[in-house]
């Protein structure tokens, strides 16, 4: 199957683009970070240092657009595991920075720790179908001043796949020291920058904050991979109408991307906009509604227009557990993302609107993607699959079980891991389900597999860095 | 959004069509019903009375195709509730004839009774978004000889929406007597034939049975609405490859439809093929896998080619309860059916591959459709929804909660019935979920609402018919 969804027509895409240009030109952004204001002023934006308002003339936008590369590479500690987008299938990324987690043993919600991060990185490393480890949770146990280093260390010690993460300005230099050490020096790291930095620099509506913008500039100016996501919430921080939220979100994407291109022309970047809607009864953000699917599909049309890879948050259920609601919300968002050919799907493991991370949910989200991936393969129609010889051989009233054709193609059928296909009485006797099996599989991998460890010398140096930072 | 799925290209559709013609011409069908063999022989098919094999020359197929009408109407007791397909949105039909049910009070699986049928008909009658009541379960308590009459009576007494059902040959005349009585005579019933008869006349591969074929001929020759569904199972009763199962299934659809058109030229009919796959580990039928979604989309392409309305079994999870698996399987099949613009979605309430019917699942399936229906509305892009005035009024850093624009468009957002959007601690305290709420809503409707009752005189006559049949 191929890209067949038209949520926005080409004319509607241009209409949203024009609306965003008008917002950038007439309303502008509040830019709290002075370095960002300098960069923008230097490149033709109208900066008001009294109000911190920055307006973007249309020609500035058109200029920077020319320098955006159409691909993005996530580098990995193991270069064979690099992922360049757009690829044949979407790149699958864990959910990131949830404050809480469901405990893998007793299922209770609690604060997440660096031990959780190590375990999750380990799982991502062991399992096919998980491409990028976005550092999934915070780490309640990180020593003062070592929050970012603790998280990156737990991640990098346990996976050789690409890692995506973030940290506050006071940690920038420490993070780089850690990464250079692991790589065996700055030059080696620059050859294979296996961490992609990621920030949300815009507080909607239209406000660039201080710290995240500082991070974007810091890494981008150093030619290290870094990209921004914007997250307007329809009805709260952006207009309640979908088109209005797309227009504001698109203006914010343009502003963030402009800043990157002006800081380092040619810096790879994503079209990363995770628009969501609020519940109209409470005004509170809720993951997983139909508006989210439409936003996802529409941002795909916009990213195609700008020719930038698209990141889509497709696993972001509002459910509190891996239940019926989680199944619906994550399968519909992921199917929508897949039919519009999103380049990257993000959010495996999230529950409760990205606030809680769950081992079972992570495994189950991967099963959802595998079902959709199989569906996206479509149907092969040729002499072999039309099977006219087998049909004639069986004839009316026979069965195909014993046909050689059936044995040859048995593996063409999808084989689920966590779907219950047992007889009813077997289910009735055990009453276990996908959630139990997913968690059991996660526990088994955690008990049996060992990730490719960091070199002993590196670990030793790491311990020294951490010790020096602890002083 | 509009029809944008291309699971089969036009060339592939023709390839499958040609393969089906070859199967019909060279392999043929085993036709057990002599009346069917007579009709087919009379119209140019090659009938072998020794082997019961019937082959369909290509020109016979081309001939009958010309008489198939492109629309189908489900008539209702209340003519305002008639449904003609294709319409603007798919017609939503309950699952039918499950032998077992989950008890609405204690949740235990048990045999279904006529009281269940009355309750479910009542629910369908009360709830928007349920268009046709396909008699959902069997009825364990039906008196000997009154199986069909008991089921139709329970259904028609409790809903004025269209009813779809079936019964064995010995019940044909009794069923008609019942329907004519309810309508106030045969002429009145013929004006508004509020029951659509439905059968599965083909045992795959390529075998027309006796009773269901007799039923098709009986109703069709009397110009009463009746249509067949075929149900090949890839790897068991049809080739394990999807294209092969499509070719066999399509041949079976053509054969069944040909029989109807030859019995009564111009009889309205559906392209109704519910192909499924077996689990490759056990060879057992399992509802809800990715093959089912692809079969659904492919049959849509075939029904478009033949210009016949499409019925798609989109709620047919293999799950044993309304759980994560049910959420995934029913939302993916229904989304696929919706993006390919299927005319009818069938199966609300089914669990365990159509073997069990559940009140909660029926309510929850309707919620899945409402989410997808909302998604299919797409995005309105105009001056009002782009909201540039509201964006300028709020400016950078404000919020949209108090904007008039937000109040005016609040109802544009989707409002779920059964999705948990509460704070986490509220959920934690109660631990209830969609399933509890769906069942609670069903119970409330059953307690409060009364369906439009049958006229007292009709009920009296009905009681007499049943009494006379009981003798």
Image: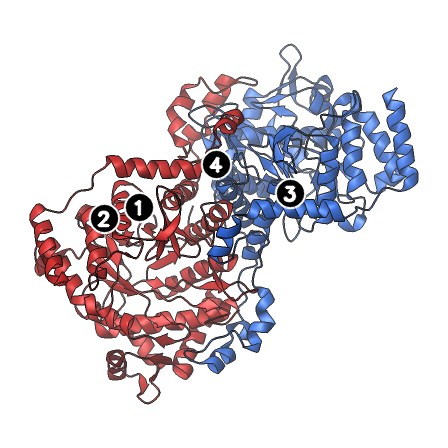
Chain colours: A blue, B red
The residue beneath circle 3 is A309
Residue A227 x %, y %: 69, 34
- Looking at the rendered structure, the secondary structure element under dot 4 is loop
Assign the C terminus of chain B to one quadrant of the image: bottom left
Left or right, B151 with reference to A241: left
Q: Distance between the residues labelled 2 and 1?
A: 9 Å
The residue beneath circle 1 is B130
Same subunit, labels 1 and 4: the answer reads: no
Residue A423 in view in this figure: yes
Q: Residue B161 carries which label?
A: 2
Residue B14 x %, y %: 44, 70
Closer to the observer: label 2 or label 3?
Answer: 2
The residue nearer to you, when weighing B422 against B100, is B100
Q: How far apart are marks 1 and 4 (CA)?
A: 22 Å
Q: Mark 3 lies on which chain?
A: A
Instruction: Assess disc 4: are there few (<14), some (14-19) or many (≥20) residues with their C-alpha within 10 Å of its C-alpha.
Output: many
Q: Which chain carries label 2?
A: B
Residue A307 in view in this figure: no
């Amino acid at each position: 199957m191929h890209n067949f969804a038209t949520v926005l027509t080409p004319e509607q895409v241009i209409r949203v683009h024009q609306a965003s240009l008008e917002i950038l030109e007439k309303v502008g952004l509040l830019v709290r970070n002075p370095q960002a204001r300098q960069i923008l002023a230097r490149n033709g934006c109208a900066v008001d240092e009294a109000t911190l308002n920055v307006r973007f003339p249309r020609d500035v936008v058109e200029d920077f657009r020319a320098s955006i590369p159409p691909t993005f590479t996530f580098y990995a500690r193991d270069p064979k595991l690099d992922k360049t987008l757009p690829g044949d299938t979407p790149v699958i990324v864990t959910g990131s920075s949830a404050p809480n987690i469901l405990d893998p043993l007793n299922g209770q919600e609690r604060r997440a720790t660096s031990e959780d991060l190590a375990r999750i990185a380990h799982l991502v490393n062991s399992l096919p179908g998980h491409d990028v480890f976005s550092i999934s949770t915070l780490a309640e146990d990180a020593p003062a001043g070592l929050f970012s280093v603790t998280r990156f260390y737990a991640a990098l010690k346990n996976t050789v796949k690409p890692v995506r993460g973030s940290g506050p300005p006071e940690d920038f230099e420490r993070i780089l020291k850690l990464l250079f050490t692991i790589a065996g020096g700055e030059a080696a790291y620059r050859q294979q920058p296996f961490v992609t930095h990621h920030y949300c620099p815009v507080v909607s509506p239209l406000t660039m904050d201080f710290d995240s913008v500082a991070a974007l500039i810091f890494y981008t100016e150093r030619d290290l991979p870094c990209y921004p996501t914007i997250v307007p919430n329809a009805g709260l921080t952006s207009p309640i109408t979908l088109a209005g939220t797309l227009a504001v979100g698109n203006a914010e994407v343009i502003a963030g991307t402009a800043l990157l291109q002006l800081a380092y022309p040619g810096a790879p970047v994503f079209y990363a906009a995770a628009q969501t809607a609020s519940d109209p009864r409470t005004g509170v953000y809720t993951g997983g509604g139909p508006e989210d699917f439409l936003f996802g599909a529409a941002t795909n049309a916009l990213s195609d227009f700008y020719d930038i890879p698209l990141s889509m948050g497709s696993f972001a259920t509002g459910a509190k557990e891996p239940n019926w609601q989680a199944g619906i919300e994550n399968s519909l968002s992921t199917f929508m993302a897949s039919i519009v050919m999103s380049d990257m799907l993000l959010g495996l493991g999230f529950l409760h609107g990205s606030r809680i991370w769950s081992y079972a949910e992570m495994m189950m989200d991967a099963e959802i993607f595998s079902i959709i991936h199989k569906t996206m393969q479509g149907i092969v129609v040729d002499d072999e699959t039309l099977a006219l010889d087998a049909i004639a051989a069986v004839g009316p009233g026979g069965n195909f079980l014993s046909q050689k054709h059936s044995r040859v193609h048995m593996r063409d059928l999808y084989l689920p891991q966590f779907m219950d296909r047992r007889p009813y009485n077997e289910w009735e006797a055990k009453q276990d389900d996908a959630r139990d099996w997913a968690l059991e599989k996660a526990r088994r991998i955690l008990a049996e597999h060992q990730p490719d460890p960091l070199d002993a010398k590196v670990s030793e140096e790491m311990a020294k860095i951490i010790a020096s930072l602890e002083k």
